[in-house]
Amino acid sequence: MSKYFKKTAIAFIAVLLFALNASAKDSGGNASKKIDIDLTRMSSTMVYAYVFKMVNEPTKFIGKRIRMKGVFSSYYDQETKKRFFGCVIADALACCSQGLAFEPAKKRKFPDEFPDEGTKIEITGDFEMAEDGDDAYPIIRNAKMSNE
Amino acid sequence: MPEIIEKISFYLDFPFVQYAIIVGVLVSLCSSLLGVTLVLKRYSYIGDGLSHVAFGALAIASVLKLTNNMLLILPVTIAVAILLLCTGKNARIKGDAAVAMVSVGALAIGYLLMNIFSTSANISGDVCTTLFGSTSILTLKAEEVYLCIILSCIVIFCFVLFYNKIFTITFDENFARATGVNTTIFNLLIAVIVAIIIVLAMNLVGALLVSALVVFPALSAMRVFKSFFSVTVAAATISVICSLIGIVIAILAGTPVGSTIVAADIVVFGLFYLIGIARNGGN
């Protein structure tokens, strides 16, 4: 009886440990996808000020997961033959625009798989610095994009 | 209501919002203190003229790529303030004509320089932010906040220390001179303080709206209160409260900060105007 009890107890503990380990792994996975800065919760004045801060002091935000709403914009650089995508936010007075470049998480064909210029989009991704020769600029990488 | 309070406390966690509130309170307090003197001395429009001079100096500083543009803006604005306020009676171009000339001249030259020697890809944004304040109060750096605190303390200290002299000069300069007050020195002091306030206030409401911070609180207080002291205290209180209300509304509703503060000042002026009429029994 005690032999069965011992085996059952060991099996139970093993299952429990496995479950705990799995749940820890699962929660770790979710934690990495946690949004650090959610700009969609803020008013346009606050978003403008926050993005201004991100562009001017990018080192403070590297590695943070960002969610933002804005309008889709793209730019083709003739020199590097590369297309850049941006999520642009106009300030309250609509004269000073502030935006962040982004890199979609999965490759998309331009223009078929992208929204039209000026379409409202929401992106969620990781804030990083992209190097371009001697220059570096802030960019949102692994960006998931959805149209409104 | 709890949602609004929750949102306000959420926004108050951001350092740049805290900076905006500190600078907003200090600038509105300083501008209202001197506002009473300027309105009574018939220099209400000096704020507009000097802020345009500050805009012109900012354009020159941008062209020269100065890292700290205050090094140019502050001395230039102080020099023009002294020129306008201290040589007033002896100058060949007098009073309002001199203010108007300096005002539009500096604005035109500033905009011209910004266009010809553009150092930024977003000229319209730069001009818009400088003229209307836009969101510049929310984009202040810690150093700018410290500078604002130091300059505001100097302004408040000077006003409190020389309150009696400023009071005498405001109402009767000739009488003050007859009683032995060195009016030239105190007019110079007022000019320097006014220039400092204008330069500080540009961050809050922008160059075009600076006059509102100087004029509205003083005029509102004058509708209800009568003595110089009570008008000054009331103007300071009105100005600080309107700035706080304006900043909070702008942050919550996403409206431009400067014009929201001025709108709050206009509403309070309307209220005080009605209170004044009611107090005087319709006279």
Image: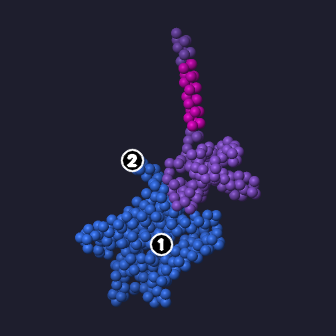
* Label 2: few (<14), some (14–19) or many (≥20) C-alpha neighbours in 10 Å: few
Find numbered disc 2 in the image and state the secondary structure of the residue it sits on: helix
As drawn, the chain in purple is: A
Q: Is residue A20 visible?
A: yes
Q: Start and end of the magenta stretch?
A: A10-30
Nearer to me, B59 or B30: B59
- Label 2 chain ID: B
Which residue is at 57% across, 61% downward?
A: A96
Say which of marks 2 and 1 sits in front. 2
Q: On residue B2, which mark appears?
A: 2
Nearer to me, B270 or B65: B270
Which residue is at 29% across, 71% downward?
A: B225
Give the answer, above or below, for where B59 lies relative to B23: below
- Label 1 chain ID: B
Looking at the image, tell me whether mark 2 or mark 1 is earlier in sequence order: 2
Residue B281 within the segment the image draws in magenta = no
Distance Cα–Cα, label 2 vs label 1: 37 Å
Picture quarter with the C terminus of chain B: bottom left
Image coords of residue B184 (percent x, y): 42, 85
Find numbered disc 1 in the image and state the secondary structure of the residue it sits on: helix
Rendered hue of chain B is blue
> Mark 1 highlights which residue?
B198
* Label 1: few (<14), some (14–19) or many (≥20) C-alpha neighbours in 10 Å: many
Identity of the residue furthest to the top in this view: A1
